[in-house]
Image (cartoon, helix red, strand yellow):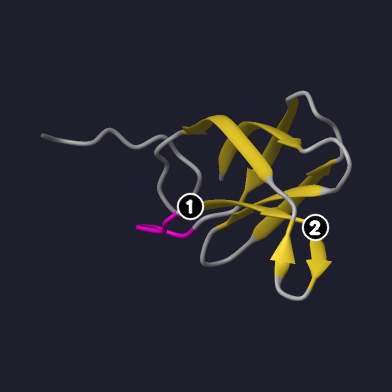
Amino acid sequence: MVRVELQLKSDGSHLATARVTSLVAGCDRSAKAATYKDFACNLRVAAGDRVKVQAEGESLGGGSFSTAFIKNVRVFYDVVDSTGQSKILEE
């Protein structure tokens, strides 16, 4: 499990969506504000998994989208084995 925290804003007139995904789970957060809003997502991950963060504006038709902005993306995690016990990594 990882926790992803980020800040998201739109152009103030349209919806902006932040999508956070791993190979096994995902979550979306949306905002319609011209100022940054704080969001968090707890995401299941597999061993060796990747975490992908993307922003998407609202469809305006004709292949055009409004602008979405993300900043201050942070990923928090603990290293554990399959039983949930803490694991110390050797160098």
What kind of secondary structure does the magenta stretch mostly adopt?
loop
| Location of residue 44 with respect to 31 vertically, above or below | below
Nearest the camera: 9 or 79?
Answer: 9
Quick check: 82 above or below 74?
below
Q: Position of residue 74 (x, y in %)?
A: 51, 30
Can you give x and y, in whole percent of width and height, for residue 51 in the image? 48, 52
Which of labels 2 and 1 is toward the front? 2
Query: Which residues fall within the magenta stretch?
Result: 46-50
Residue 59 to residue 20: above or below: below
C-alpha distance separating marks 2 and 1: 23 Å
Residue denoted by label 1: 51
Q: Nearer the viewer, residue 75 or 80?
A: 75
Q: Which residue is mark 2?
A: 58
Q: Tag 2: Cα neighbours inside 10 Å, few (<14), some, or many (≥20)?
A: some
Q: Taking 9 as reference, is 82 left or right?
A: left
Q: Amino acid at mark 2?
A: Glu
Mark 1 lies on a secondary structure that is loop
Q: Quick one: quadrant of the N terminus?
A: top right
Q: Which of 57/41 is in front?
A: 57
Q: Which mark is residue 41?
A: none
Q: Quick check: 50 left or right of 72? A: left
Front residue of 15 and 64: 64
Reply yes or no: does residue 20 show up in magenta. no
The image shows residue 60, relative to residue 5, as above or below, that is below
Q: Residue at x 80, y 64 (%)?
A: 59
Where is residue 45 shown, x and y percent of the image? 52, 55
